[in-house]
Image (cartoon, rainbow, N blue to C red):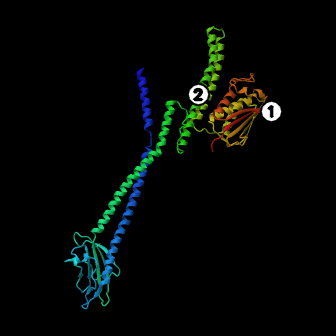
Amino acid sequence: MDAPRADGAGSEATVAETVKARHTGSLARRMMLIAAGWISILLLFGGLALDRTLTSLVTRNFDEQLGYMLTGMIGSAEIGPDGEVFFIRPLGDQRFLEPNSGLYWQIRAKGHEDFPSRSLWDRSLDVPKDNFDAKPHVYDSDQFPGEPLRIMERSIILPGSNTQWMFTVAASREDLDEQIKMIRSILVYSFVALGFGLLLMAGMQTWYGLFPLRHVRRAIQKLRTTGASRVTDPLPQEVEPLVDELNALLSHTELQAEEARRHAGNLAHALKTPLTVIMNAATAKSPDLSDTVIREAAVMRRQVDHHLARARAVGRRAAGMSRASVWPSLEAVLRAVQRLYDDTRFDLDGNHAVTVALEKQDLEEILGNLIENAAKYGGGSVFVTVDTGQDPQFCEIWVEDDGMGIPAAERTRIFDRGARLDTGKPGTGLGLAIVRDVVEIYGGRVELDESEDLGGLLVKLKLPRTAT
């Protein structure tokens, strides 16, 4: 006895593990990956753009200083009696007088000796003599080992001379490179700290944003552990549709369970009396025991058929969205009924394209019961009209006959199981009861009235339309 229980427990555990393993990943992980990707891209491109902007500003400021010095040189230069260039006033920056100070100037012309600053000492700037630059030209140079230079040069023809003089100012890039390095270091540390801060904020936002889902989980757990029937905890608007669908599913499940309990109780109650009759007859050894068994067995079979029809309708309704075309089902039912009542006239009219939210088998069973009753108890004419009204939610089907009809006082009782007004014709008395039960399961209605055209019974069947 223990082995089957172990196998069952193992199967349940396997199913639970399989169901638990079926997921599409973590929402929090997805949100964090998206946030991290965008933050990285934006910080990378933003950092590169800011680095380029700041580096350009610092370099431009450095070049402007060189430009001021070059302009001062040109403004102080004159041509002496010997045709050589000289300064009429000393340049203002003291570094030009200090050897290897990192700030240099030089004047060069073809056919003339170079005129260098004292800071160059025994070196000279390697600039072309025959190149004419009317505007200042700036560039980097590595001509001094271990001392990268930023050089600005300009060609000028001084008054009183036809010679093209090349004025050159050079400054060590050490200060400029140090400033650029400091800027980039600050940018890197700042953007790394900003990135971590943004990721931390995104993580907090993800945790806080998904926190209501934990409330939903606890609410569902409370349903399972406390026996509550609905999720009533206040939740954000984005989660409310999910909770509404969950509550609707719970309501639907409760309705199915209640229907199942009611059907089981009704069936047990319906079978109890025939079984009691059979037991009494068998105990008393009644001489008509066989007839009693046959009669009561037929009663039990009718009850079983009735409840099976209801159970099938409930099961098919719960399986999903049902859909059936009325006209083809109606024609199929008429072909079957005409074989049994070939002397009855059947007329059809109405909408050929209407569809209803029923399973085809249930729709044909409903129509078959109604049309067969109309042919059986009518006077030879049956008229079926499809979609008589303009109700946007229900399709109304009328089944009329020219029989004796049903008195108004009996129209409610006729839907009871086993109720029959005409006992002279064969039947079980379950046709209209099955029709009513199946129609109500799908959310429809069935009513009885008097036919104005044929004078007999008018059955008004209202079935829910399919959603468009």
Above or below, 330 relative to 259: below
At 49% from the left and 42% from the top, the residue drawn is 212
Residue in front for this viewpoint, 110 or 198: 198
Residue in front for this viewpoint, 329 or 386: 386
Within 10 Å of disc 1 (Cα), the crowding (few <14, some 14-19, many 20+) is some
Identify the image quadrant of residue 85.
bottom left
- Is residue 137 visible to the viewer in this orientation of the structure? no
Q: Pinpoint residue 422: horizontal percent, then vertical percent.
A: 75, 23
Which quarter of the figure is the N terminus placed in? top left
Above or below, 318 relative to 54: above
Ranked by sequence position, the earlier of labels 2 and 1 is 2
Within 10 Å of disc 2 (Cα), the crowding (few <14, some 14-19, many 20+) is some
Q: Pinpoint residue 425: horizontal percent, then vertical percent.
A: 74, 23
Question: In what element is the residue under mark 2?
Answer: helix
Q: Is residue 271 left or right of residue 148?
A: right
Q: Dot 1 corresponds to which residue? A: 455
At 60% from the left and 38% from the top, the residue drawn is 322
Q: Pinpoint residue 19: horizontal percent, then vertical percent.
A: 45, 36
Instruction: Choose mark 2 or mark 1, whichever is in front.
Output: 2
Q: Which three-letter amino acid code belongs to the residue tagged 1?
A: Gly
Above or below, 52 relative to 208: below
Which quarter of the figure is the C terminus placed in? top right
> Which numbered disc covers residue 260?
2
Q: Is residue 107 left or right of residue 355?
A: left
Identify the image quadrant of residue 231.
top right
Q: Which three-letter amino acid code belongs to the residue tagged 2?
A: Ala
- Considering every residue shown, the one lying at the far left of the view is 122
